[in-house]
């Protein structure tokens, strides 16, 4: 589990969606870790068309002889993310950003795999990473991760049948 802050991601990336995605991926790798051996490989891995230069200028990520290194850490954690695999999906930048935003509506102390539907404007509900059911917005990648981790176990976060 990694903690993040939506407003920090936005401000550190100058609100550039590709920057938010890059910083989220960097968080998944940890501070002072190589996040990719090259920029072109990182672009391909995240399915984005550019890495905003502001991330280099602010030294949130650094190019080195060994690759691209993460220097970004969350200073005021407000929410969390468990599964980062979806960042590699061939999905639109917009859908990924909406998902990160939706996750940001779940506090650190909330261990549910969903948020109440009132937390997210209905214009965002049509997203491959989200499922609207029973007045809740479910986090599909988080559910997938849980199901892979705990095959056969039933949890409070289960969507149930139907």
Image (cartoon, grey):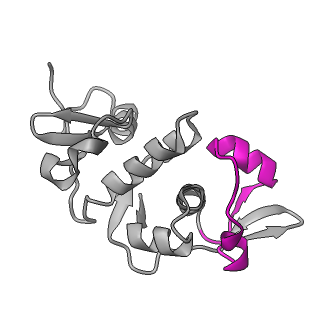
Question: Above or below — where is 3 with respect to 38?
Answer: below
Q: Which residue is drawn at 39% across and 38% down?
A: 141
Q: 161 or 21: which is nearer to us?
A: 21
Q: In which quarter of the image is residue 13?
A: bottom right
Classify the position of the N terminus by image quarter.
bottom left
Q: Residue at x 80, y 48 (%)?
A: 40
Residue 104 image point, x, y percent: 33, 60
Q: 48 or 89: which is nearer to us?
A: 48
Classify the position of the C terminus by image quarter.
top left
| Residue at the farthest left position | 134
Q: Which residue is drawn at 22% across and 50% down?
A: 121
Q: Does the magenta stretch include residue 57?
A: yes
| Residue at the farthest front position | 123
Whether residue 16 can be seen here: yes
Q: Is residue 149 magenta?
A: no
Residue 11 image point, x, y percent: 49, 75
Residue 60 image point, x, y percent: 64, 74
Whether residue 82 can be seen here: no
Q: Give the range drawn in magenta.
A: 31-60
Q: Is residue 15 left or right of residue 146?
A: right
For the image, the number of numbered tags is 0
| Residue at the farthest top position | 162
Question: Above or below — where is 118 with respect to 138?
Answer: below
Q: In which quarter of the image is residue 79?
A: bottom left
Question: Above or below — where is 21 with respect to 108?
Answer: above
Q: 133 or 147: which is nearer to us?
A: 133
Residue 153 image point, x, y percent: 24, 31
Q: 78 or 152: which is nearer to us?
A: 78
Q: Is residue 106 left or right of residue 160?
A: right
Q: Residue at x 53, y 57 (%)?
A: 17
């Amino acid at each position: 589990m990694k903690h993040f802050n939506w407003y920090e991601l936005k401000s550190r990336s100058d609100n550039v969606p590709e920057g938010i995605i890059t910083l989220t991926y960097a968080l998944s790798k940890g501070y002072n870790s190589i996040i990719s051996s090259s920029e072109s490989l990182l672009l391909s891995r995240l399915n984005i068309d550019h890495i905003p230069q502001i991330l280099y200028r602010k030294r949130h990520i650094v190019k080195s002889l060994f690759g691209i290194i993460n220097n970004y850490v969350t200073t005021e954690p407000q929410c969390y993310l468990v599964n980062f695999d979806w960042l590699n999906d061939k999905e639109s930048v917009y859908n990924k950003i909406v998902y990160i935003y939706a996750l940001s509506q779940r506090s650190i102390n909330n261990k549910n795999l969903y948020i109440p539907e009132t937390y997210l404007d209905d214009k965002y509900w049509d997203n491959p990473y989200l499922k609207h059911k029973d007045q809740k917005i479910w986090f599909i990648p988080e559910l997938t991760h849980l199901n892979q981790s705990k095959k056969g176990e039933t949890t409070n976060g289960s969507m149930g049948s139907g």
